[in-house]
Amino acid sequence: MTAAHTAALAGVVSNSAPSNSSESAAVAARFHVIGDADPGLLPRLLEPIAKLGATPMRVHASREAGDGSELTVDRRLGLVAQRTAEQVESALRRVIGVRQLVVVIEPAT
């Protein structure tokens, strides 16, 4: 494990709800990632969602830092199984270049 990967994992924050409900319950999930402004980061962040057969409702990416070294990416998934949202979260935690991850998983309304 590289020092950059260790630092990325140390900065991970999760606000996901406890999983005391059924694994098949529909949820809405939001993933907010801050990472290195590397050309390969965006496809690496979208890949876990595509591999699980989900399509994001929204994807927004921008370079936020004043020097352009930071990429901020927001993705929203709506009406997916809780397990799918948890799998996406787990996969995003392992993406190289991620500095911080904030995840919000809420019951579908």
Image: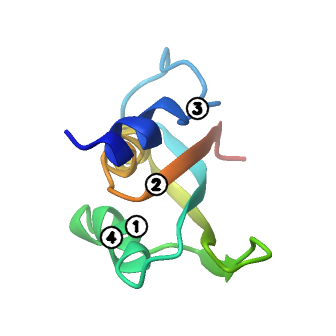
- The residue sitting at 34% across, 80% down in the picture is 40
Asked if the residue at tag 1 contacts the one at tag 2, i.e. Cβ–Cβ closer than 8 Å, the answer is yes
Pointer 1 residue? 45
Rendered view: 41 above or below 12: below
Q: What number is the disc on residue 18?
A: none
Task: Please give the name of the residue rendered at 37% of the width and 47% of the height, measured from the top-left corner.
Answer: 4
Question: Picture quarter containing residue 80?
Answer: bottom left
* Furthest residue in direction bottom, as rendered: 39
Which residue is the site of mark 3?
14
Identify the mark nearer the N-term, 2 or 3: 3
**Apparent side of residue 31 relative to residue 7 in the rendered image (left or right):** right
Q: Earlier in the sequence, mark 4 or mark 2?
A: 4
Q: Residue at x 30, y 62 (%)?
A: 48
Badge 2 amino acid: Val
- Give the CA separation, mark 4 to mark 2: 10 Å
Q: Are marks 1 and 3 in contact (CB under 8 Å)?
A: no
What's the CA distance linking mark 2 and mark 3?
13 Å
